[in-house]
Amino acid sequence: MIHLGIFAKTFDRKTSARLADAIALAGYECTQFNMASIGLDTLPSVVDNGHLETVRRDFAASKVTIPVISGTYNMIAPDSKVVEEGRQSFRVLAEASRALGYSTITLCTGTRHATDKWKIHPDNAGEEAWSAFRGELDRLIEIAETHDVVLGVEPEPSNVISSPASARRLLDEVGSNRVKIVFDPFNLVEWSKRDYASDTLLRAYDLLADATSIIHAQDMRNDGKPCAPGTGFIDFPKLLNLFVRGGFSGPIIAHGFDESEAASTAAYLCDLLPPKEPVH
């Protein structure tokens, strides 16, 4: 069953109870969690079990589930220490999955840029960068197997997995059910070719739908900036209809907008999804 969610970082709250309430009141059933939402680093070096239990209890009370958490670090950073520290913190998130209930940890497939994991670098397209990424991914797959979690790979123009084609290559090479796709239309269309956005997304769907476990609902304005779904040029009715008809059953996670737009975005997306079966 499809569940509608939102990035936890959309809301700035001081406690996990208030955060969970805000998510629920805005009309969402689940969230892509981020440890930064509870005052930690996105990839913390340690997480207190008591803290995790408080979060679990607060979200359960608000009936908001946590199917996915952000675990992004630069997997091919030029500084190997950055990679090693990221991997160790990733392991902490994997260990915490049992407490909070998430089954997917999202990744940053990495860039050779020295200081920003979201900035492009000319070496990203080379085979050396691909090899470095594959080696690091294999290490994360081992961690994922141990803790029974899935790795969410999102094609990002600035990273090694920069396109639907490179994501498809990865899936075919790895052949592991621990590696799934996060389909974010914002990162799959080019602003300069926005008139062809629907065709671009249809081709991406054809390549990646079979391995997509999460959809990120983020729209794009005519100036290339992110915005709430339904307020940009991405055809969400057509895109979500494709996924629904194709049997998609994962979470749809909205982001890229301000908290003031959270409730209206939930209402917009709910209208595009099949009605929920009544609970008796």
Image: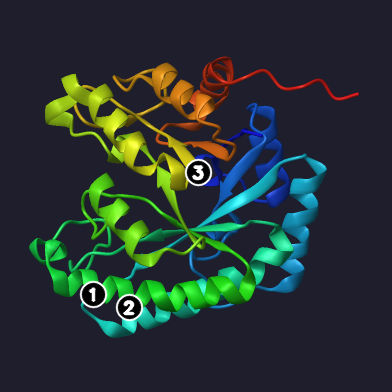
Pick the quarter of the image with the C terminus: top right
Q: In the displayed structure, would residue 17 be above or below residue 50?
A: above
Kind of residue at disc 1: Ser
Residue 61 appearing in the image: yes
Residue 16 locus on image (x, y percent): 69, 51
Residue placed under numbered mark 3 in the picture: 214
Q: Do the CB atoms of the residues marked 2 and 1 lie less than 8 Å apart?
A: yes
Q: Secondary structure at mark 3?
A: strand
Residue placed under numbered mark 1 in the picture: 131
Kind of residue at disc 2: Gly
Q: In the displayed structure, would residue 243 be above or below residue 60?
A: above
Q: Which mark is residue 135?
A: 2
Residue 144 locus on image (x, y percent): 55, 70
Q: Secondary structure at mark 1?
A: helix
Q: Earlier in the sequence, mark 3 or mark 2?
A: 2
Q: Quadrant of residue 228?
A: top left
Q: In the displayed structure, would residue 275 be above or below residue 57?
A: above
Q: Name the residue at 55% across, 55% down.
A: 69
Kind of residue at disc 3: Ile
- Left or right relative to 199: residue 38: right
Residues 68 and 135: in front is 135
Residues 229 and 263: in front is 229
Q: Name the residue at 59% across, 37% down.
A: 249
Is the residue marked by circle 3 packed among few (<14), some (14-19), or many (20+) residues within 10 Å? Answer: many
In the rendered image, the residue lying farthest to the left is 122
Q: Quadrant of residue 198?
A: top left
Pick the quarter of the image with the N terminus: top right
